[in-house]
Image: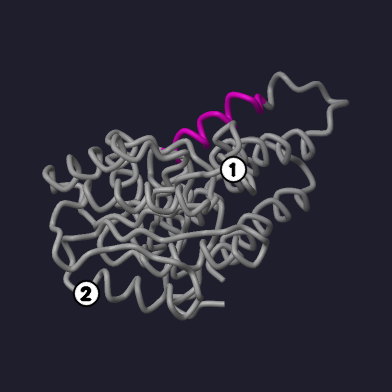
């Protein structure tokens, strides 16, 4: 697993530093350079890595540390805190409550595995006693409704969509209204995949969000998107109130560091890591 490799590289760098007889500037720099290299190779955004390195150096001023201080411990703690800061948005994601209707809207780039992830998310909650339903507000991609219908039928989850209606806002509103009447407590709205450059699709996503007033917007991200993750995630966050991230295809050849960048860009926690297409 990608992030396990990254964790291993960071642990090794800290271990080497801890094994040094004398902890001086050279040893500290070597350790930080190793960690920096590992993060950049994993596709964490350069600015995030640079900021982390600067912050650690500010905290760990070797000249100021008296002889009695445990320098190893102080450096380890500083590294740990900075890595956590990168991943910790400072607030937990919204969690749906059983018996109380929640609307969750999924957004993301084309091909990120959004529709599959919607069904997995619904199925996960269904097994835990929720009454989920799926609404297909993706009128842009041919076959989107068919895919959602197939997934939902297989998982025995009610769904709503249309072959005739081309207005995603109308479908989203109708679907949400219908499932509220049917007392579903987790209504999941799937939207069209889009790219940062597509202004019209972003506007449409904003309208769907305004019309359905979701309790949570989840940004779905393919882990192989790499360095582009920060900019893409930020573009979504600027259009709709992203509150959580799901990273998909974690079992592919991806480096996974983009996930850390997406968390930093959206200030939202990663709530699930997805593997390839299968349900269950």
Against 115, residue 20 (above or below) is above
Task: Inspect the magenta stretch and tell me whether residue 58 lies in it.
Answer: yes
Give the mark toward the camera: 2 or 1. Answer: 1
Q: Residue 162 at x, y = what percent? A: 22, 64
Q: Residue 168 at x, y = what percent? A: 21, 52
Residue at 34 percent of width and 62 percent of height: 160
- Image disc number at residue 261: none
Q: Nearer the viewer, residue 64 or 117?
A: 117
Residue of label 2: 143
Residue at 39 percent of width and 48 percent of height: 105
Residue range of the region highlighted in magenta in the rendering = 48-61
Q: Quadrant of the N terminus?
A: bottom right
Residue at the far front: name it.
181
Q: Secondary structure at mark 2?
A: loop
Residue at 59 percent of width and 31 percent of height: 90
Q: Quadrant of the C terminus?
A: bottom right
Q: Is residue 235 left or right of residue 118?
A: left
User: Count the marks: how many?
Assistant: 2
Q: Earlier in the sequence, mark 2 or mark 1?
A: 1
Magenta stretch prevailing secondary structure: helix
Task: Inspect the magenta stretch and tell me whether residue 212 lies in it.
Answer: no
Q: Quadrant of residue 61?
A: top right
Residue of label 1: 100
């Amino acid at each position: 697993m990608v992030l396990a490799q990254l964790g291993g590289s960071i642990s090794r760098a800290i271990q080497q530093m801890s094994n040094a007889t004398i902890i001086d500037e050279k040893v500290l720099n070597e350790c930080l350079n190793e960690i920096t290299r590992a993060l950049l190779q994993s596709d964490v955004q350069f600015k995030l890595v640079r900021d982390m390195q600067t912050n650690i150096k500010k905290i760990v001023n070797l000249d100021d540390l008296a002889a009695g201080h445990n320098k190893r411990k102080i450096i380890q703690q500083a590294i740990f805190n900075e890595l956590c800061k990168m991943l910790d948005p400072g607030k937990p994601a919204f969690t749906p409550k059983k018996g109380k209707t929640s609307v969750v809207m999924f957004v993301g780039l084309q091909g990120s595995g959004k529709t599959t992830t919607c069904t997995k998310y619904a199925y996960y909650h269904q097994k835990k006693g929720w009454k989920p339903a799926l609404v297909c507000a993706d009128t842009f991609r041919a076959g989107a409704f068919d895919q959602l219908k197939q997934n939902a039928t297989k998982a025995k989850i009610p769904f709503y969509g249309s072959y005739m209606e081309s207005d995603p806002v109308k479908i989203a509103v109708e679907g949400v209204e219908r499932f509220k009447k049917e007392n579903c407590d987790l209504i999941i709205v799937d939207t069209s995949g889009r790219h940062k450059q597509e202004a019209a699709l972003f506007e449409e996503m904003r309208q769907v969000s305004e019309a359905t007033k979701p309790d949570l917007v989840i940004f779905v991200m393919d882990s192989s998107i790499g360095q582009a993750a920060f900019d893409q995630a930020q573009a979504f966050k600027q259009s709709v109130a992203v509150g959580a991230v799901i990273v998909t295809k974690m079992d592919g050849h991806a480096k996974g560091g983009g996930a850390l960048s997406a968390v930093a860009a959206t200030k939202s926690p990663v709530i699930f890591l997805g593997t390839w297409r299968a349900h269950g």
